[in-house]
Amino acid sequence: IGLAWHEGTPAELTDFSCRMLGTGIGDPAFFNDELIVAGLRDHGVAEADSYNYMNSTCVEIKVVGASHMWVTAPYFNCPKGLLEVMDGIAEGEIDEPAGFAELNRLVKERMAATVRETAENLDRTWHRRGETGCFPLASCLIADCLERGVDFDRGGARYNWVENSFVGLANLVDSLVAVEELVYETEGPEGLSLGAFREILRADFEGHEPLRQRILNRLPSYGNDDDRADGLAVEWAEFLAATTEGNVVGLHPYVPGYFCWVVHTHFGADTGATPDGRKAGLPLADGAGAAQGRERSGPTASVLSTTKWDHRKALGGLVHNVKFSKNALSTDQGIEALGNL
């Protein structure tokens, strides 16, 4: 259940929704109504239709009864791009970067190539479905398929976009902070070469637990209203949005998202240790917020970090998960604090 929340939402409804959340059921999710409406209009949705949207499966944004039925395709593993670049450097396939800025650029190039290749494959799938697919019954219920006499698989729907989702943004950001700090800024015995850091990751930090704890507890991390980490998150979120929208799938620019369903556990199970201190096999961050357990400065700081970058383009869906103890929401004061947050 989603609540399309805006500044004019009655206080009674906000309070009721917070009390529902206080029971532990996890509903309703709060959606930023004004921002989503603006983002829909940016993508060519008529004003009247822009108010009539829904979170179509999880948090993907679709216009009700007027959109085709494609949702997230696919999910992208953000920290994997960094590990692949580090592997390429270690194996001599990529020249050693002169500094952190060059390393950051190489990771962006790797991620952009992955998004581009995926979009090209999806575009071929889109056109193939137009020839061999089609959903006649569903198309009877989607504007403007009947009026046009065209199945939604052939572009008959009023609105058409395909969404992706970037998983582990926080892990990538925190990993980049750690690499910048330990490889490019720390001199002497505490500093590391990029190759040495990669070997430590391959060993899953075995024999290097003090280093892992230093990364987790002493270095800046996304989700704490820290401008160094959050600045990288802003940079990367803007880059990923621009990279996605630079590709076309079917009839519309590709649309970015930042949520994960359960894919953060699947990706994590197949991803080795990462420079942010995460051990091999553990889940990646579960959405657009901080990696689990790293919001050391409280929920307000965590929300401030996530909202330093513009969510207006993220029609593919975006989630910031926050979890509270039962005791925190067991009083009227706790419910009021949640509403204020």
Image (cartoon, rainbow, N blue to C red):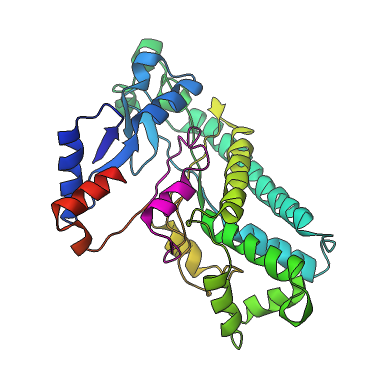
- Number of residue marks: 0
Q: Is residue 139 left or right of residue 225?
A: left
Residue 289 location, x and y as percent? 45, 53
Residue 247 % position (x, y): 62, 34
In the image, residue 124 sits, relative to residue 339, either above or below, namely above
Residue 286 location (% of width, % of height): 42, 57
Q: Is residue 276 left or right of residue 262?
A: right
Residue 264 lies in quadrant = bottom left
92 to 235, vertically: above or below: below
> Is 294 placed left or right of 125 in the picture?
left
- 246 or 330: which is nearer to us? 330
Q: Position of residue 48 (x, y in %)?
A: 34, 14
Query: Would you say the magenta stretch is mainly helix, strand or loop?
Result: loop
Which quadrant, please, contains the N terminus?
A: top left
For the point 57% across and 76% down, the residue is 214
Q: Is residue 52 visible?
A: yes
Q: Is residue 170 rendered magenta in the image?
A: no
Q: Nearer the viewer, residue 226 or 240?
A: 226
The residue depicted at 72 percent of the width and 66 percent of the height is: 86
| Residue furthest to the bottom | 207
Q: Residue furthest top?
A: 147
Magenta stretch encompasses residue 303: yes
The residue furthest front is 333
Q: Residue at x 46, y 38 (%)?
A: 316
Work out whether 245 lies above or below 107: above
Q: Is residue 260 visible?
A: no
Q: Which residues are magenta?
A: 292-320
